[in-house]
Image (cartoon, grey):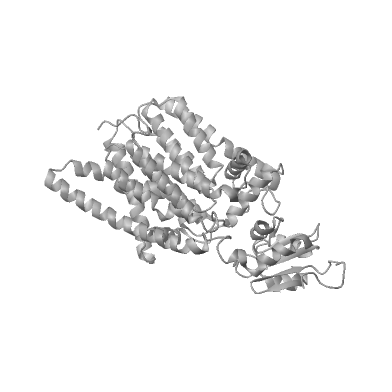
Amino acid sequence: MKVNSRLFSLSTNLDSLIAAVIGFLIIQTFSRHSGIGVSPDSVTYISAARHLLEGHGFRAFDDFPVVDFPAGYPFFLAGVSFFTRLDPLQYGALLNGFLFGTLIYLCGTVMNGFYHTSKWYKRVMLCCLILSPALLEVYSMLWSETLFLLLMMLFTIAIKKYLEKPGTKWLLISAALVSLACVTRYAAIVLVGIGLFLIFFEGRPSFGRRIRHCLYFGMVSVLLLLVNLIRNETFTHLATGARQKSNHSLMPNIQYFGDVLSDWLLIDRKPGVSIFITGIALAIFILAMLWCYFRRKTERRYEYILAATGLFYCLFMLISASLSRYEQFTSRLLSPMYIPLLWSTSFWIPSFVSGKVKPVKLLYTGLALTVAAFFLNIELSEAYETYDGVKDAGIPGYFEDPFPQSEIVQFLEQYKPEFKPGYRIYSNAGDAVYLFTGLPARLLPQWVFPDEIRKYYQEKNNYLVWFNDVDNPDMLNEQTVIRNKGMILIKKLQDGAVFVTPDSVFSSNKRPGL
């Protein structure tokens, strides 16, 4: 079927533009109470962006070089702050709304390039994207995924251009986009593998030319990441930060993976069901990719690229989570596979329906729309539940009520001038201390690093700020620190406490804050 060559024109994408505006407005609505959502990771991005803008280097809230996260997103925020003269917390909602709207618009244009186009299919899919619980969660927070998802979609468009007519122009553009994605999220390394796979198995160019293009793509796509890793190794001797060995094997991770998919479908989490759903997702990607590869040998359309992207990303997350320890699978971590999964599950429907005689065609169309309405109702219910929670309390995170009004936060803001210069601040939530005071604060050492614990116990002249509502069992607890360092209480509050080491000499006999 002939596809409109002006895939990205406004005249072809009025529905995409409307969907993009609606997506933008939803993010503004969610952020109305207390601004964009801020998590501990968000504080790292914000502090790094501020330090970059101030000329203090790529440093986090603890004043250490940032290595756990790549430099791309903080540099992006610093660039926006440079041109707007605003702090990320001031423009976060507008920026995320714009990024979300842009992603939706690009998704609409990509659907114009499907082998079989359909206006009703496109508009139903746009509604699914607007109401997606995974995408709404990501774009409600100041997270690097907001930029990463957009770069993934741009890579899909660029590599499609290359596969249409293999040449160095779109090859290098695709590689440059992957390079940017790799310094936005370390997980973007999977895009390098996806690109090499698509280039190598594109049969039209000669074998030698494909090998050369793979080399060009590989070198350019990892360039920025290598620079980032070399910088990390130089400053901290840790290329990607302190990574622990995974404490979960492959099978539990398959279950946790399916738990997230169950949440997207509003299905109760059950181990057997979750494992089954993960298997179904992998099977959908494999079947969609193989069907597109062998059925459409003469042209590689978006459906093939997206199915390959979804499959590679799923496998990468499952394998990497079984080797390296990071947070258990969440909607945030798996959000990059939402769009490929949605399309790989449904792209064949318009072609299947169009080939039927009218009575059967109406029957199948009605059935497809019924299933779509059921799925959209699930998403709408979850989106409304989210809105009902954030409209009065704010987006979950450090600015969600009542955390900013908590006694410990109020005390820290008032006590800020009393913190003695030269005294380091430690906390079980150093990011929160920085967020509400602007003072650098280090996280307490974790149990798995005994050398760091020993150094901490020997260190003098420091404060301990403890948040009762922050639970991290991997970190030293309050009583252990107080006992081993003989900390002196400055202020005990209902939801936290502030201590200082006994070597502190105050200007009066009265303890500050009492």
| Location of residue 195 in the rendering, given as x and y in whole percent from the top left corner | 44, 37
Left or right relative to 27: residue 90 = right
Where does residue 236 sit, x and y in percent of width and height? 69, 48
**Hey, which quadrant is residue 295 in on the image?**
top left
Residue 498, by quadrant, is: bottom right
Residue displayed at 54% across by 46% down: 186
Above or below — where is 283 with respect to 455?
above
The answer to whether one can see residue 318 in this image is no
Q: Residue at x 72, y 66 (%)?
A: 464
The answer to whether residue 64 is visible is: yes
Q: Quadrant of the C terminus?
A: bottom right
The quarter of the image holding the N terminus is top left
x%, y% of residue 202?
Answer: 37, 32
Judging depth in this view, the residue of 49 and 410 nearest the camera is 410
All told, the count of numbered labels is: 0
Report whether 447 appears left or right of 99: right
* Nearest to the observer: residue 480 or residue 44: 44
Q: Position of residue 489 (x, y in %)?
A: 76, 73
> Which residue corresponds to the image point at 24% horizontal and 51% vertical from the top-left?
368
Q: Is residue 45 left or right of residue 424?
A: left
